[in-house]
Image (tube, grey):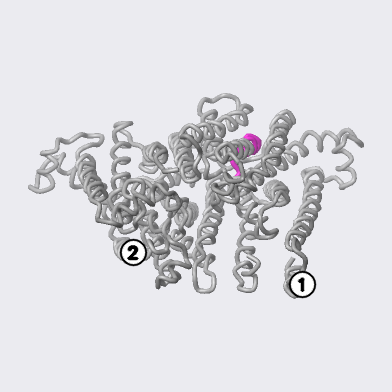
Amino acid sequence: MSGTAVRDRKRPAVSRPGGAQARQRRRVLLIGGCSLVLLCVLVTLAVTTGQLRLPASVALRALIGLGDPADVLVVQDFRAPRMVAALFAGVGLGVAGSMLQRLFRNPLASPDVMGVTGGASFGAVVLLATGTSQTLIPVAALGGGLLAALLLGVFGWRSGVSVARLVLVGLAVQAGLAAAVNLMVVRFPAELANSALQWTTGSLYGRTWTEVWAAGGAIAVALGAAFVLHRKLAVLDLGDDSAGGLGLNTDAARLQLLVTAVTLASLAAALTGPVAFVALAVPHLVRFAAGPPTAGTLVLSGLGGAVLLLAADLVVQHLLPVKGLPVGVVTATLGAPWLLVLMIRQSRPVNRSAA
Amino acid sequence: MPNLKSPHVSRKEQVALSGPSLLPLTLLLAGAGALAVCVALSLAVGSRSIPLPTVLDALFDDGRGRDAIVVTGLRLPRTVIAVVVGAALGVAGAVAQGITRNPLASPTTLGINAGAGFAVVVAIYALHLTRPVEYVWFAFAGAAAAGLLAQALARRSGDIDPVRLALGGVVIQMVLLSWTQAVMLASSRTLDEARFWLAGSLSGRTLDVLWPVLPTLVIGLVLALAITPALNTLALGDDSAQALGVPVGRIRVAGGIAVVLLAGSAVAVAGPVAFIGLAAPHLVRLAVGSDHRLLVPGCLIAGPLLLLAADVLGRVVVRPSELEVGIVSAFLGAPLLAVLARKVAR
């Protein structure tokens, strides 16, 4: 990528208007292609590796139900649900984070800040506390996330939605719910505290196809809504006054976007638990790499989230010496170096004009 | 700060600029009064209630007996520590939000709490420590290392980029948090020891915990108070501040160091109490406006007030046991913040 940047700078700045846009589009396509290839590699790795090592051709054929029934069983019932769950959740988190950061015009905005994470942990831990069967935990996590969204709406809505107020209310909701989780972790006996901790970091263990398809279908619908609403997001980027002048009802648009983003994040949290870092970091990675936000970068955020989450899950399953760590423990460790490198690269004075 | 943009607040500020308004000062005085009440409550209330005359007797007249020992031996140190820690966290939060110009910033988002938490958890895991008094130096070292690393990452040709400071801090925080959780999940003994400290608590702390961090606290506070006028100028944006003759880079470095010293000491004493540093500046800002010359002293009052109230409440609700102050302060502060946020002008 630095190669294209150098070439671009040498070229005299007489290119026709729209040249910068075309250049960005090309760059988005390039990065998108790379992430797609990377994603395919990761998917292949996810279905081939494990206790029973399968050749890639066999594993991929088993994925669509061809070949030896034993292989099909291993791939379709054990490896694929986990892989698909990581894909859906990663896409949902990446897109939700990207939308929230643009909506709030704040680089720190993410579902973690807006209370969704706290809500999902809260739901899961409450269910653990009541001692009901653990299969219901995803539903509880979804309910918790939506509870956070509801609280956000109740306190944040007052004849309109203002950014500053929503941020403050989001912080308050997150803090309150996180404190409730903390309280239960401290008061629980040690074994329960351990499984509560698992669910507050996010984990992909034991996902079944019913869960994956239910949450995945809902995520797909929400993603559709997100891309339909993208045009409004672009108008809101101009600032409230200009957006209003262009005939956009800013309050309604912001509420729709917020609900969509929070729903996406809650659904992702229902699949994997509150995985940290993906929603915060992936949009920044994409912005550093691909430039100002467009519909294309929104797609890239989704792809990036899926790549990061799947890669982290593979590391958790196969590379770590300690078995049984949740995936949320690895996402930050795996994602942080990329973000830090991009941040430092951007600090070089040469690149300042591009920033 | 977002409220600077809204016409509603700026009108209020014009009023404040045109003549010294008495309202903020009255509010500060009222806060100080409430703090005094909380101190008295903190001395008198607990698993064993002690009437106020006995408390005064024990404090000033060399009272004898079990009640006096409880007051001077247990509750007085605890109250002093709560006041100091609350003040440090409140001021650190105000300065952190000022230098990053981000209302979501706080000592937590600069990675300080996570650094302390990770250092302590590793110390518990590797060295088999069991008492909070032994954690102090590990916590301070971890907090300072994480905070300084976040600022080193944000340096950009001599200046600290506020967006990158906030972002780098959060990244470091998340990495350290995930490592902390990894250690705790790998060793259940560590989880059992550390979860109480990680919730943030004032119980079982004596003044011995406070003495080692007192110098850093004082230096941090002096530094923070020294840069408050400049923080007002910084709120106008880097370019305007530069044009007005404020050394933006140096102010930001000084502010960063102040935050690390204050919050690092606080976390070393009381564990990672997350919410005070975030909520205290917002509460004060909603009360007296965004002038840092009032905001920082206001946080000196609001931080201890919030922490002490939470501590007293935590001792009362589940008597004779008690709740950790970090948990109660979030329970107490969250609705307060949500309700006050409704008043933020459109």
Query: Is there one chain holding both mark 2 and mark 1?
Result: no
Amino acid type indicated by mark 1:
Arg
Q: Position of residue B280 (x, y in %)?
A: 36, 48
| Mark 2, secondary structure of its residue | helix
Q: Is residue B152 magenta?
A: no
Q: In this view of the protein, can residue A58 be seen by the observer? A: yes
Give the magenta range.
A265-275
Residue at image point 64% right, 35% down: A267
* Mark 2 to mark 1 CA distance (whole Å): 46 Å
Side of A268 where B137 appears, left or right = left
**As displayed, is residue A20 above or below residue B305?**
below
**As displayed, is residue B279 above or below residue A189?**
below
Amino acid type indicated by mark 2:
Pro
Side of B291 where A216 appears, left or right = right
| Mark 1, secondary structure of its residue | helix
Residue at image point 62% right, 27% down: A136
Q: Position of residue A111 (x, y in %)?
A: 57, 43
On the rendered image, what quadrant is the C terminus of chain B found in? Answer: top left
Query: Which mark, residue A208?
Result: none
Q: Is residue A274 magenta?
A: yes
Query: Which mark, residue B229?
Result: 2
Near mark 1 (Cα within 10 A), the count class, few <14, some 14-19 or many ≥20, is few
Chain for numbered disc 1: A
**As displayed, is residue B229 above or below residue A142?**
below
Q: Which residue is mark 1?
A: A7
